[in-house]
Image (cartoon, helix red, strand yellow):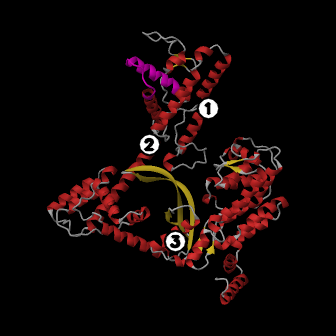
Amino acid sequence: MLFQIITGIKMSSNVDTRAANKCPVFGHSCELVTNVLPTYMNMMMYYSHIRQKLSSDQAKEPTVSEIAEIVATDIEAVWHKASIPVVSHTRILKLIRNSHDELRKLMKPFKGRKADNKYLLKLQEYADKSRQKLFVIAICKCVHGNCGCAKQNKVPPQEQHFLQDQRTMRIMFIGSVDRVSSAKLKKHYDRKLKEDSRAKKALKLDLIDQCPGVIDLNNDDSSDAEIGLDEDLSQTEAESNTMITDTETLTSSKPSSSQMRRKLPKLAKICDRLAVSDRVGAAVATSVLEDFGIVSQTDANVIDRYKLRRERKMARDHLVDSTDAIQTLYFDDRKDKTIKLEKKGSCWYRNVITEEHITILNEPGGKFITHLAPKSSSVRDIADCIYTYYENNGYNITNILGIGCNHTATYTGPAGGIIRLLEIKLGRPLQWLPCLLHANELPLRHLIKHLDGKTTGPQGFSGPIGSALLNCELQPVYNFVAISSSIPDVSLSELSTDQRYLHEMCLSVMTGSCSEELARRNPGKMAHSRWLTTANRILRLYISQQNPTHSLQMLATYIMQVYAPVWFAIKSKPSCVDGTKHIWLTVHLSRSLPTEVKNIIDPVIQRNAYFAHPENLLIAMVTDDRDHTKQLGLRRILKARKEQKTGI
């Protein structure tokens, strides 16, 4: 067992001596101190203490799981006492087992190497590390002041200083109950109970109003029933979930011919999304209500297939009516792992496959419509799938004027792209509105490929710059040469963590100094589907090089002078009427770059400048702030309509 291994001493079969119970790494075992958060050393010493206690109380040696269960429960109680949200009990058990396995592996050669100074130094380093490192089981691992966790998982503000102290100096300790804070929490809890009580009373009145003539307030029987209802409404939150059942019991005292009038929009939507029949959807919904005791088969609230069929039709009609004014279709694809059932013989088997999913959105507003699974990833199957969905669900696809996607050849191919195939099906051209953020990434991607080599896999790079990006945030910051830039004003509250990092890093590179807090921050996960985080890491690598290479300087300059300004300009003005201006801004800012860089990025910009096409230029003209530009754009449109050659 572990304790026999770490002692390296032959133990007596009768009584364990004090020397036999001493660990060469941590010393004698001891109880868990409950007024401070435990370190790894405290945890392992308490683990040894529990093991000795269980060994003396039972004949056989306790298992690791038995010991870890007790240790995890007690450590969890200490963290709860400090009012800090912790991870799941299973996760705590895993952390304890990992520490146990690490120590066991370290102590395995102890008998043969206990005279080896190098080995003893290794044990001492492990002990020092365990003594200083806090055994952290808090859910929130964020840096103080930059927490993005959910509210229930955050470390309370009044406990953040204590947690920081426990990680460093360990001067503070957990005291007695904070009467002031407890009084505030109790007041908040009492106020919430009163609000719940008022809401339940209002619900009772609504239920009575919805059932006129069913409950006679002058009848003695109904009074008793109403008292029963009051008692049910005053129960706990868990019991209040059965309130519908109690109310239906009230209404059953008199015969009623009421029909099922409740709307079921969410049930209708999920049935359409999963493509189940009316019969199956109604059977599943009614079965769930029965299991919860809400309805019975003789109840008027039972959902039949005809009710669900009407609800699905109303939901589709409502969606069609609400989307008639939206005349742009946006779509994107993604390969997801999907569970499929396959029949082999008379048995069904579950199989995980990679399936193509197409997400459909309506703009403006980014309203999600559905996701589709085409027969294959071919361009024609995807186009047929989108067109068929609109036809089968009553959407008027002929009203669509614009279509948006990213810039891959699968979507924007001039002859066999998805947009072109949809135009052929509709018999008319559409307004092409490809993603400008994707268009802004493509020149950066080609520039990295030219200066640093090709990519390797979904995250890696083959060149020296790309290889150094993985751990760039760990490198120290040196004095670096500032790079001029013109970053547009944006609302920081609308930016994600990675986007805000790019904004702050650009400002730091502009001024020539970077704060320690920003240098320690994570630039974001690197992936070839998220080039913004790659730009973050390139700038972070640039400020950590005393003598940056010419290629790294060119990449950092391009990001500062073209990529980042255009990105934030698109973020601040995402409308399609500004698309042409963003293309012009890309061209304008890139003119100051070296000829070598322009020779690489100019063909990429030209291939993906869809917002420089005539139809998008006209949109920019008729929405311009200058009257003469609006009039010129309008004259061009009227002239084109008279000629009837372009299909506009």
User: Residue at 59% across / 18% down in the picture?
Assistant: 109
Question: Is any part of residue 292 visible from this angle?
Answer: no
Location of residue 572 in the rendering, given as x and y in whole percent from the top left corner: 65, 65
Q: Amino acid at mark 1?
A: Met
Above or below: residue 464 compared with residue 589 = above
Q: Residue furthest left?
A: 220
- To which quarter of the image does residue 565 belong? bottom right
> What's the magenta bit mostly, secondary-structure-wise?
helix
Which label sits on residue 182? 2
Magenta segment boundaries in residue numbering: 43-65
Above or below: residue 445 compared with residue 641 = above
Q: Please give left or right for residue 515 compared with residue 109 in the image.
A: right
Q: Nearer the viewer, mark 2 or mark 1?
A: 1
Is 477 in front, or is 286?
A: 286
Is 623 in front, or is 307?
A: 307
Q: Earlier in the sequence, mark 2 or mark 3?
A: 2
Q: Residues within 10 Å of mark 1 (few under 14, many from 20)?
A: few
Task: From the image, tell me which residue sits under label 1.
Answer: 169
Is 246 in front, or is 198?
A: 246
Q: Residues within 10 Å of mark 3 (few under 14, many from 20)?
A: some
Task: From the image, tell me which residue sits under label 3.
Answer: 387
Q: Amino acid at mark 2?
A: Ser
Distance between mark 2 and mark 1 Cα atoms: 27 Å
Question: Is any part of residue 329 visible from this angle?
Answer: yes
